[in-house]
Amino acid sequence: MSAGTVDRTDGTEEAGGPDGPAGRRREQRGWYFYDFACSVYSTSVLTVFLGPYLTAVAKAAADADGFVHPLGIPVRAGSVFAYAVSVSVVVAVLVMPLVGAVADRTGRKKPLLAAAAYVGAAATAGMFFLDGDRYLLGAFLLIVANAAQSVAMVLYNAYLPQIAEPHERDSVSSRGWAFGYTSGAFVLVLDLILYSGHESFGLTESEAVRICLASAGLWWGAFTLVPLRRLRDRKAAGGAGNDRAPGRVGAGWRQLAATVKDMRRHPLTLSFLLAYLVYNDGVQTVISQASVYGSQELGLDQTTLITAILLVQVLAVAGALGMGRLAQRFGAKRTILGSLAAWTLTIGAGYFLPAGAPVWFYALAAAIGLVLGGSQALSRSLFSHLVPRGKEAEYFSVYEMSDRGMSWLGPLVFGLAYQLTGSYRDAIISLVAFFALGFLLLVRVPVRRAVEAAGNPVPERI
């Protein structure tokens, strides 16, 4: 085989073939667009509109004491959104490993990605009908959409080791995140124009919100067509992809047990997962609790908070691309460690923000945006080097479970800190522990040895 060829599991070696540089670039460009498609759901639906709107719908259905009664269980109307998110996490954690195992056994990631994406997009588009007192419909659609997004992300992430050479993965992963933040910011601007000017468009506030929610589902479904056209399925390791017997699907859970057992043979991969679990829990908690801190502790209005979210989205694009370039020079591990140090300083500075001063909150949002996308993108690309070939979807299902399955810990620490001290400043500073501990755990991971132990080539800079 000549130096200009690429050896792949499907036997295509020609430089100009599907697995050659031109073919890889085509798939990479298609892959970016799934982030472009689904990130609008995370930004406009989860972060901005659905929480307050679903809470208002639940309160419209509540009794005189402020309770709704799904399945006869008394639930405070203000807790419906949080409980629905929690249920969606449980559903996702149960489904992700099954889908990951089936994807690797059959080699057919693309139809599974299509199914998960369009289930999520349809549920999101269905939120247009969430009005009046239909809180159960809203909770059901949220559970379906959120779980479907998690499952789709497992399959999406699992493509990274297949479409990018080891030396390309940091930049490819970073571009994917940048595409996602770009679409999130663009659609959020359109949503804010519609929402703030709904009367001039002849709409009620409720109608404007429902259009914003449904349009996110339509955007998700429309742009998912791009990766589905460009991504290719590969044969499963050992030719398993030719076995389509129904029993193969039933073997998904047995395969999960085998995956967990197999991961014990790669303790360095598990060490990275532990570090990621800790510091990413801090990242997710900052994302979910920053608006609470801004409104309750700093006394900022809703317009300021939404504008700050938009600022985070815009700067996260530059941050993801910039950190991708830093990783090419210094390696992914060192760049992630640098971002964790920046996170620690940023959250520490947040403790001292003066109340009623939006400019300082914007400065905090800018700092978060610059490190947010890059730390997540490089974590994904670094993990891709630690996955044995042929087990991408299974290992990324565990990666996603590490994210989703433990996403309750940071909010719990935040809530307990507030309960014990009565101060959101003390609660926000408690999150420094996640970044500091994650930094220490990641420092101890010998990533070069971890890549070698997974049987993968070691990039020049890692």
Image (cartoon, rainbow, N blue to C red):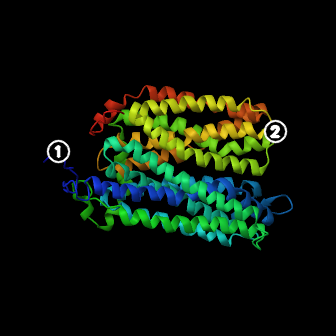
Q: Position of residue 354 (x, y in %)?
A: 78, 33
Is 163 located above or below residue 272 in the figure?
A: below
Left or right position of 213 against 436: right
Q: Position of residue 133 (x, y in %)?
A: 76, 69
**Residue lying farthest to the right in this orientation:** 64
User: In whole angstroms, how far apart are the C-alphas of marks 2 and 1?
Assistant: 62 Å
Q: Which mark is residue 116?
A: none
Could you tell me which residue is drawn at 71 percent across and 45 percent down?
A: 291
Is residue 243 or residue 118 the one in the foreground? 118
Q: Quadrant of the C terminus?
A: top left
Left or right position of 447 against 88: left
In which quadrant of the rendered view does residue 445 lie? top left
Is residue 262 or residue 339 the one in the foreground? 339
Q: Position of residue 20 (x, y in %)?
A: 25, 54
Q: Which residue is mark 1?
A: 3
Q: Which residue is mark 2?
A: 356
Is 173 located above or below residue 248 in the figure?
A: above
Mark 1 neighbour class, 10 Å CA radius: few under 14, some 14 to 19, many 20 or more: few
Residue type at numbered disc 1? Ala
